[in-house]
Image (spheres, helix red, strand yellow):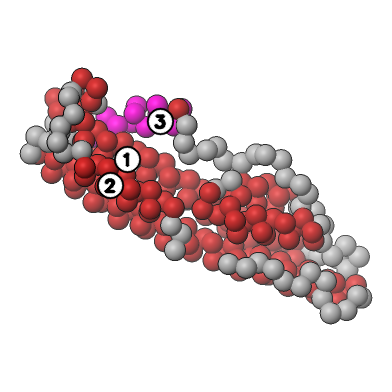
Amino acid sequence: MPFGINLFGKGHTQEAQQDSAKEMVREWQRNLRSEARGVDRSIRKIEQEEDKIRKEVKDMAAKGGDPKSIHMLAKSLVRSGKAKARLYTSRSIMQSAVSELETTAATMRLSDSMSKSAEVMKQINSLSKIPEMEESISTMRREMMRAGLIEELMDEGMEAMDGPEMEEEAEAEVDKVLDDLAIDASLRMEISRPQAVSAGGYAEPAAAVGQRQAQAVASTG
């Protein structure tokens, strides 16, 4: 989605520059709201996939399916839950940024059409670290820098989704997912230790689910 708009208006008077700056702020607000709607769609897609996976886990457990494959499915639920939590956080940041921009526009003085906002800078920095929003938010960030609303951003923001620590955390929460799904305790113990079980022939559904999860998280449309 393009974010480019006229930064300076048709005239060079202070009034024209201020009007242009306010229009720019309104455009940023519209684009942030649009991104937030995309996040809501992604969350709904993840929840739909989660429902499918929960049903698959229960069916496999009831039929004595391969513990290793059930473990993979349960871990995908842990990951999708964390991805969903990050999307909720990003939506909240967008809503805060919209409100902060509203304040910026309302308090804009004729002698200082665009004052720097540390809060907006922090919010946009966080959003720019989310892979699904990197391109559109980076474009908006450059416009804000040109307009003088924010400065060059430091390399901060939300932590990466992947990595050894995230993987260990997902493994640790598998048993809780199985407990929430009311899986038998003895089977949970076997599922939580898949390395002790030889791989069975039911691994393909887990791989397919992993692909569906990746597509759901990556899509904002």
Q: Residue at x 42, y 48 (%)?
A: 84
Q: Which residue is farthest left? A: 63
Marks 2 and 1 sit apart, C-alpha to C-alpha, by 8 Å
Of the two numbered discs 2 and 1 in the rendering, the one whose residue sits closer to the viewer? 2
Residue 123 visible in image: no
Q: Which residues are magenta?
A: 165-179
Locate the C terminus by quadrant.
bottom left
- Name the spot of residue 176 as percent of width and height, x first: 28, 32
Residue that label 3 marks: 167
Q: Which residue is farthest top? A: 196
| Figure quadrant of residue 159 | top right
Marks 1 and 3 sit apart, C-alpha to C-alpha, by 11 Å
Left or right of 29 on screen, residue 41? left
Q: Is residue 136 above or below residue 73?
A: below
Residue that label 2 marks: 209
| Figure quadrant of residue 153 | top right
Q: Residue at x 18, y 29 (%)?
A: 199
Q: Please, what secondary structure does the residue beneath circle 1 have?
A: helix
Q: Amino acid at mark 2?
A: Val
Are the two marked residues, 2 and 1, in contact with CB atoms closer than 8 angstroms?
A: yes
Residue that label 1 marks: 76
Q: Is residue 108 above or below residue 85?
A: below
